[in-house]
Image (spheres, rainbow, N blue to C red):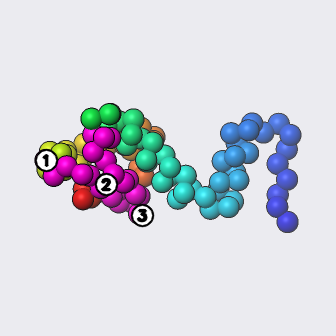
Amino acid sequence: MAKRINNQSTIGDVLNRIIQVNKLQPGMDQIDVKEAWRQLMGNGVNSYTRNVVLKGQTLYVELTSAVLREELSYGKSKIVTMINEDLGREVIKDVVLR
């Protein structure tokens, strides 16, 4: 039987507990990383972004521009740092640009 949470818990605490108990964190990370990519990269990069997928701790980004892919490949470590800082914890360790 599930543990009863007292009535003085905040909604955020209750939702975090539900995510933890039901092992929903990987799915939440997937959503958070997609949103972070969209916000941090801006409209210019987003217009050439086809797909963003998080598998384990690797972020796979599918781009439609070879020139942009080459340009972003020089800043992979900065992209990892920016996204992890935006999320407040280390979610990704590597970026693969396709």
What is the distance, in whole Å, between disc 2 and disc 1 at their CAs? 14 Å
Residue hosting label 1: 67
Question: Could one spot residue 73 in this view of the protein?
Answer: no
Residue hosting label 2: 61
Which amino acid is tagged 2? Val
What is the distance, in whole Å, between disc 3 and disc 2 at their CAs? 14 Å
Point out the tag, 1 or 3, that comes first from the N-terminus: 3
Question: Which mark is nearer the camera, 3 or 2?
Answer: 2
28 sits left or right of 47 in the view: right
Q: Residues within 10 Å of mark 1 (few under 14, many from 20)?
A: few
Which amino acid is tagged 3? Gly
Image coordinates for residue 11, horizontal then vertical, percent: 73, 38
Image coordinates for residue 8, horizontal then vertical, percent: 82, 36
Point out the tag, 3 or 2, that comes first from the N-terminus: 3
**Up-down relation of residue 90 to residue 43 (above or below):** below
Report the front residue among 64 and 54.
Answer: 64
Residue depicted at x 32% and y 33%: 43
- Disc 2 to disc 1: CB gap under 8 Å: no
**What is the span of residues highlighted in magenta in the rendered image?**
45-67
- As helix, strand or loop, the secondary structure at mark 3 comes to loop
Which amino acid is tagged 1? Val
Residue hosting label 3: 56
What is the distance, in whole Å, between disc 1 and disc 3 at their CAs? 27 Å
- As helix, strand or loop, the secondary structure at mark 2 comes to strand
